[in-house]
Amino acid sequence: MGYYKIAEADSIKPGEKKSFPLRSRMILLVNVGGTYYALDNRCPHMGGALSGGDLEGATLSCPRHGARFDVRTGKNVGDAKLAFIHVKVGDAKVFPVKVEGQDVLVELD
């Protein structure tokens, strides 16, 4: 357990997201209004890469089936949809983030 450097602060502008490999995981780093948030890049529904989804404010949608998550908390704010069926989806896993100088650090358990 500890904090690990994932990126330079100026590499992701507000409103942008990018995935990074970090200690055998893919972590999605998101910048919302100058604050960084980190999530597991895998959707808890069927493992879709969240990095391919649309970011609107602090809400990120999964490109596979449209599940939506608040990147600040990981909470599900919109279930997935398969054809005409709505599917309950759990919350996305989030990781603590801190910035030291220009380094963005993510805590992994």
Image: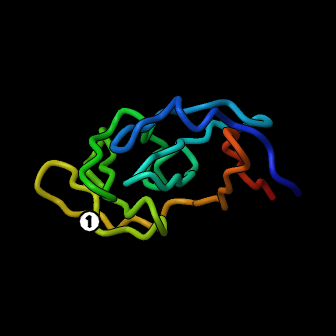
Residue drawn at the location 30% of the way across and 39% of the way down: 63
> Which amino acid is tagged 1?
Gly
Residue drawn at the location 49% of the way across and 43% of the way down: 47
What is the quadrant of residue 85 in the picture? Answer: bottom left
For the residue pair 84 and 74, the one nearer the viewer reads as 74
**How far from the left and from the top, in percent, is residue 82?**
22, 50
What is the quadrant of residue 67 in the picture? Answer: bottom left
Horizontally, residue 53 falls left or right of residue 91, namely: left
For the residue pair 73 and 92, the one nearer the viewer reads as 73
Horizontally, residue 33 falls left or right of residue 25, namely: left
What is the quadrant of residue 53 in the picture? Answer: top left
**How far from the left and from the top, in percent, is residue 28?**
53, 42
Residue drawn at the location 53% of the way across and 54% of the way down: 37
**How far from the left and from the top, in percent, is residue 11?**
52, 29
Q: Relative to residue 33, is residue 53 depicted above or below?
A: above
Q: From this viewpoint, which residue is outermost toward the front?
A: 101
Q: From this viewpoint, which residue is outermost toward the right?
A: 1
For the residue pair 47 and 8, the one nearer the viewer reads as 8
Q: Secondary structure at mark 1?
A: strand
Q: Relative to residue 36, is residue 28 depicted above or below?
A: above
**How far from the left and from the top, in percent, is residue 23?**
80, 36
Q: Quadrant of the C terminus?
A: bottom right
Crowd band around label 1 with a 10 angstrom C-alpha radius: few (<14), some (14–19), many (20+): some
Numbered circles on residues, count? 1
Q: Relative to residue 106, is residue 87 depicted above or below?
A: below
Residue picked out by circle 1: 78
Residue drawn at the location 65% of the way across and 33% of the way down: 7
Q: Relative to residue 20, is residue 106 depicted above or below?
A: below
For the residue pair 81 and 38, the one nearer the viewer reads as 38
